Amino acid sequence: MFRSNNLTARIFERQILTPRPGTSINLFRHFYENVCPSHTVHDIDCPDLSFRKFTDDGQFLIGFSRNHQDLVVYRPSWLNYSCKGECPYSLDLPPKARRFDSFFRHLFTISLASANEFICKDFFLYVDPYRFGLFATSTAQVNDNAASADGAIHGVPSIEKITFHLVRLDDGVVLDEKAFYNDFVNLAHSTGAFLYDDLLCIVSLRYQTIHILQIRESGNLVEVRRIGPYCQEDDELFLQSHAQVSPGSSFLPGIKQRLLSFIFRKTWNEEADQSMRVQHLKKKFYFHFQDYVDLIIWKAQFLDRHHLLIKFGSVDGGVSRNTDQGLSFFAVYNMETTEVVTFYQNSSEEMYSFFERFYDFFNSVSRNTLHAQYISSHTNNSHALNQLLNIKSKSGSFSQFVKKMMLTIPYTCQSHSPSPYFDLSLFRYDDKLISAIDRHRHSTEHPIKFISLRQPNVVKFKIKPGAEGGGPDGGRAKKVSSFLFHPYLPLVLSIQQTYMQPTVVNLHFKR
């Protein structure tokens, strides 16, 4: 760690001191204590778009048209302007420099959605090594009373068409598409999909199938595996051949059979006494057999290239916006051997122990994403761990606390900003008002303060969303804000939305 807070002294120290192995980037991130957003352009003159996020490599700003038909992509170019004669630093920016296009260069606008489809503005995944973007469109109507098709789960709604589009962000070329018909994929906050390196998994809730696709450098989406009704490539052929011998018989889906087999063997091995095993199985397995059979896949994520973490629960919980649905289960599935490796209830203390000690293992960041590897968590940051332990100590019920923590896994892919201003070893801020998690927040009339951790009485910078004077409603209307932090530049967009009023976009940057 640098011995001085002075920027010049820190630059000199960087030249003469060698950091410990593996700590150089963490050390250099301390320069962000000296390079903070210091100026705000309120209600910047910008296109009327719905801005989604910066890509994790900082090369692109993703936006959508208000009618959810078009994809609009910009490249951050930083402020570039000149003034005649002397240009004192204290002067405000000239009008031409207060425009959106002074900071961002428009790359392209393309139409992704057809006439009866709309872009899901909450869904976006960035394929870092190839600079591709994955987007989703769907038809608007959701049929909650869809008839049960062959293999479909009763109670899960149906969307006529969901299409995933792979777009090359350098020039806007649509490289490939993958469509799902009369299906249901949870597109909100990219929940129904997970990206790991070049592998993509998409969870079909309606047909209880995990689709594993590989994103090729050529821009092709190639389906390499399906996990659900069948686990091995020849399972369907095998069952069809045996159906002729035993017509009318029904089989459990392959993934459900693997799960029940694991639970049975686990329960069997829990009781060493041969005479008590049958009673133990009756109590722990057969009594709950139908409950296990009724479980459906809610969500899935990669742990590595061979293992999936799958969350199971009730049908109602799988499609509800309320994520606190009580009982749920977690299973680790080996895609190569088609075996369930382990199985836990969401109140398991052992599962929570893994969560507390190895959370970064759930946050399986691609090795190609440099900046995302330094997102603060309670397993890599002592300050984040202290926050978690403080919440844990104040919890009235440990089992309820465990269930609450288990709501955060499986991890939602690319849901955290890698900006160094969210590094809890550098800055302290009110996480009720702002955090690295990609979610809307209720607005406040007061600026959000980022306070130096090394100098607890020093406010490094402030971010105030909304109009400069607070707006004509006097703070009475309900407002929500979102914040888009560039992954490494001192550049932030704050976007405030108020019911029946224009959206206010502020730009915060280092002058």
Image (cartoon, rainbow, N blue to C red):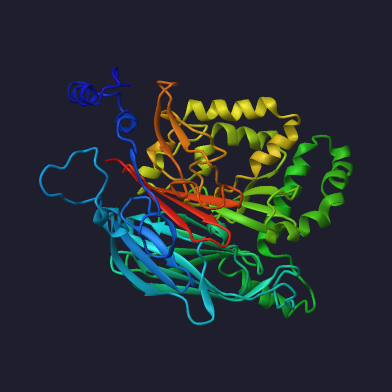
71 in relation to 339, above or below: below
Q: Quadrant of residue 299?
A: bottom right
Dividing the picture into quadrants, the one containing residue 51 is bottom left
Image x and y of residue 482, in percent: 49, 50
Residue at 67%, 77% (x, y): give it: 240
Q: Is residue 238 visible?
A: yes
Residue 287, image x, y percentages: 87, 50
Q: Can you name the residue that lies furthest to the bottom here?
A: 115
Between 489 and 201, which is closer to the camera in this rendering? 489
Q: How many circles with numbers are drawn on the protein?
A: 0
- Quadrant that contains the N terminus: top left
User: Considering only vertical position in the picture, is 386 above or below 341?
Assistant: above
In the image, residue 486 above or below residue 451? below
> Residue at horizontal 75%, vertical 57%?
314
Residues 140 and 343: in front is: 140
**Residue at image point 77% right, 59% down:** 293
Residue 31 or residue 375, whichever sits in front: 31
Residue at image location 47% in from the left, 76% down from the top: 113
Q: Position of residue 190 (x, y in %)?
A: 53, 58
Q: Is residue 254 above or below residue 373?
A: below
Residue 370 visible in the displayed image: no
Q: Residue 53 in the image: x percent, y percent? A: 42, 55
Q: Is residue 37 left or right of residue 337?
A: left
Left or right of 361 in this view: 295: right
Quarter of the image where the C terminus is located: top left
Farthest residue in the top direction? 3
